[in-house]
Amino acid sequence: MGQDATSTTRKQLSRHDLGIPGFEEYQVRVDFPKGTMAPNHRHPGEEIIYVIEGHIEYQLEGQAPVTLKAGDVLFVPARTVHSAKNVGTDNAAELGTYIVPKGKPLSELVK
């Protein structure tokens, strides 16, 4: 049996309060082994994605899919439903930086 298509791995790199009252930042490295994806989800605040390696296709609600490669950046507005999948032949990875309200879950799966 093959690897589960949602078998991404996440490593939290930082989490700090911001100078903006009630907000904090997270930085997370997300690895997408070949053929894996992060299914539809959303965040309570903004996400800035920097692709570290590989090719990742992002689907943001109401927009055409876009494929990014290492060095590319994508901004995801707060509460925007989106998904991401490795469309390359090797591992893909991103650095996600989140600016979110304190006390809210970092992400929420969306059916």
Image: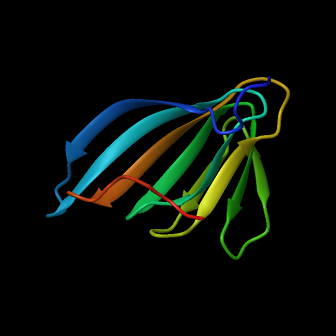
60 sits to left or right of 20: right
- As drawn, the residue found furthest toward the right would be 89
- As drawn, the residue found furthest toward the bottom would be 62
Q: Quadrant of residue 107?
A: bottom left
Q: Residue 35, percent across and down?
A: 78, 33
Name which residue lies at 43% across and 62% down.
46
Q: Looking at the figure, which quarter contains the C terminus?
A: bottom right
Name which residue lies at 71% across and 60% down.
59
- As drawn, the residue found furthest toward the front would be 1
Q: Quadrant of residue 60?
A: bottom right
Q: Residue 69, percent across and down?
A: 75, 39
Name which residue lies at 31% across and 34% down.
14
Q: Quadrant of residue 1?
A: top right
Please give the count of numbered marks on the rendered protein. 0
| Colour setting | rainbow
The residue closer to the viewer here, 36 or 92, is 36
60 sits to left or right of 25: right
Q: Residue 39, percent across and down?
A: 63, 52
Q: Is residue 62 above or below residue 25?
A: below
The residue closer to the viewer here, 10 or 74, is 10
98 sits to left or right of 82: left
The residue closer to the viewer here, 33 or 66, is 33
